[in-house]
Image (tube, grey):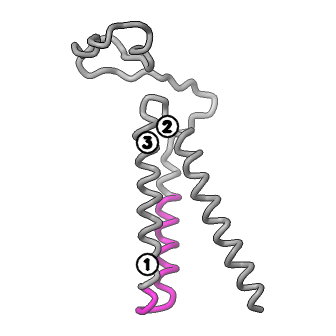
Amino acid sequence: MPSLVTGLSLFGKIGVTASFSLIFLVAIEMYPTVTRCMGFAVAVSSASAGLMLSNTLDFLEKYHYTVPFVVYGAMMASVGLVGLFFPETIHCSLTNVQQCRHRKIPLQEGARLVGRPSNHWDDC
């Protein structure tokens, strides 16, 4: 019996590690190129906050042994509900153009590397 518990525990830890690694892949592919860095930073920060919070939620067991499970379930259900509101982008062309606030023309990604002088961005 102890080997079964150890095996299930190891299987759970492998699943948590795999899901944490998948967060990076999903975050990179979910955001457009121009906002990818900020979206990736928010996703990694949220994942790290969840990891830190999960260690402290286990202390709720002193009130009742089911409280941590209810809190974890509520958190997973809320994330699932938020995920339902993501727009579907299958068969849609996603542009990599971001409108600059002070200019009338769109600012394209990589335009600074096309040979324009470095002070070109001062008038933006």
Residues at marks 2 and 1 touching, judged by CB atoms closer than 8 Å: no
Image quadrant for the N terminus?
bottom right
Where is mark 3, residue-wise?
A: 39
Tag 1 or tag 3, which sits nearer the N-term? 3
Height in image: 65 above or below 9? Answer: below
Q: Is residue 61 magenta?
A: yes
Height in image: 94 above or below 16? Answer: above
Residues at marks 3 and 2 touching, judged by CB atoms closer than 8 Å: yes
> For residue 25, what is the image quadrant?
top right
Q: Give the alpha-carbon distance from disc 2 to disc 1, as whole Å.
A: 30 Å
Height in image: 9 above or below 88? Answer: below
Residue 62 locus on image (x, y percent)? 43, 92
119 sits left or right of 59 in the view: left
Image mark count: 3
Three-letter code for the amino acid on which mark 1 is drawn: Leu
Give the label on residue 57, or none. Answer: 1
Crowding near pointer 1: few (<14 within 10 Å), some, many (20+)? Answer: some
Give the label on residue 73, or none. Answer: none
92 sits left or right of 54 in the view: right
Q: Is residue 66 magenta?
A: yes
Three-letter code for the amino acid on which mark 3 is drawn: Gly
